[in-house]
Amino acid sequence: MTLPTGETSGTPSIIDTTGDKNFTPTYIAVALVEVIVLAALWAFSRYFVA
């Protein structure tokens, strides 16, 4: 990656992730929503089959 001064940053990564916040709470929230949605789909399927 080239800096505005023309120098290289020294990092070989394509995407600069410095300064990114911790995404663990987001991952937990997504997993929780997925469990809730799957449970609701299962409950609806049980309701309509019976």
Image (cartoon, rainbow, N blue to C red):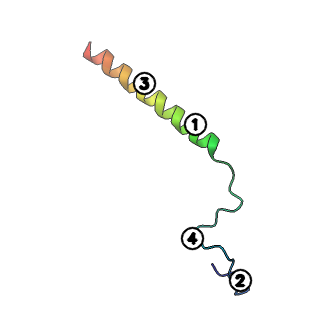
Residues at badges 2 and 1 in contact (C-beta under 8 Å)? no
Q: Amino acid at mark 4?
A: Ile
Q: Earlier in the sequence, mark 3 or mark 1?
A: 1
Residue 6: name its quadrant.
bottom right
Q: Is 5 rendered above or below residue 29?
A: below
Which residue is labeled 1 in the image?
29
How crowded pointer 2 is (Cα within 10 Å; few <14, some 14-19, many 20+) is rated as few
Q: Residue at x 47, y 34 (%)?
A: 34
Which residue is labeled 2 in the image?
4
Q: Which mark is residue 39?
A: 3
Q: Residue furthest bottom?
A: 6
Residue 49: name its quadrant.
top left
Q: Secondary structure at mark 2?
A: loop
Q: Which mark is residue 46?
A: none
Q: Amino acid at mark 3?
A: Ala
Q: Amino acid at mark 1?
A: Ala
Q: Secondary structure at mark 4?
A: loop
Asked if residue 12 lies left or right of residue 36, the reply is right
Percent across and percent down for residue 24 are 63, 43
- How far apart in space, not on screen, are marks 4 and 3 (Cα)? 39 Å
* Image quadrant containing the C terminus: top left
- How far apart in space, not on screen, are marks 1 and 4 (Cα)? 28 Å
Which residue is labeled 4 in the image?
14
- How far apart in space, not on screen, are marks 3 and 1 (Cα)? 15 Å
